[in-house]
């Protein structure tokens, strides 16, 4: 499994990329989006979610620093296919 994590500070870019990845065929085998809120330090954060029908809710998270939006994706592959998966 190839695992990729992409962090965003811009909510519009995060949702644009997430919607594109979900709607396209033959992208990833697993796609998850979530919010990371810095409470006291980068090591002490927690994940949260919000209603996609209310994207304004994403700006209401209380953070002691930056609010990050994250996409995690996985791609399953055979070892012989590694070169094409990396592309």
Image (cartoon, rainbow, N blue to C red):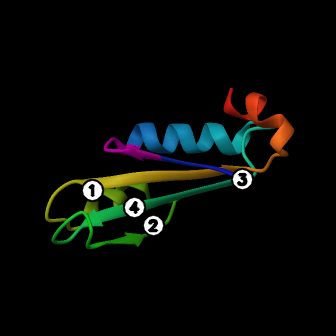
The residue nearer to you, when weighing 54 against 8, is 8
Q: Which segment is the magenta one?
A: 6-11
Q: If you read the primary sequence from the N terminus, does the residue marked by circle 3 or circle 1 appear first?
A: 3
Establish if 23 lies above or below 46.
above
| Residue at mark 4 | 35
The reply to whether discs 1 and 2 touch (Cβ–Cβ < 8 Å) is no
Closest to the observer: 81 or 56? 81
> Residue 42's mark?
none
Viewer-nearest of discs 3 and 1: 3
Please tell me which of labels 4 and 3 falls first in the chain: 3
- In primary-sequence order, the first of circles 2 and 4 is 4
Query: Mark 4 or mark 1, which has the lower sequence index?
Result: 4
- How far apart in space, not on screen, are marks 3 and 1 (Cα)? 28 Å
When asked about the image quadrant of residue 37, the answer is bottom left
Task: Specify which label sits upstream in the sequence, 3 or 2.
Answer: 3
Residue at 65% x, 40% y: name it.
Answer: 21
| Residue depth check, mark 4 versus mark 3: number of the one nearer the observer | 3
Residue at the location (41% across, 71% down)? 48
Disc 2 to disc 4, C-alpha distance: 8 Å
Assess whether mark 1 and mark 4 are in contact (beta carbons under 8 angstroms): yes
Q: Is 38 in the magenta?
A: no
């Amino acid at each position: 499994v190839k695992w990729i994590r992409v962090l965003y500070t811009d909510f519009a870019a995060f949702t644009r990329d997430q919607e594109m990845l979900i709607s396209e065929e033959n992208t990833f085998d697993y796609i998850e989006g979530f919010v990371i809120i810095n409470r006291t330090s980068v090591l002490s954060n927690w994940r949260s979610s919000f209603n996609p029908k209310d994207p304004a809710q994403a700006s209401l998270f209380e953070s002691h620093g930056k609010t990050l939006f994250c996409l995690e994706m996985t791609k399953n592959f055979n070892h012989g296919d590694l070169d094409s998966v990396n592309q």
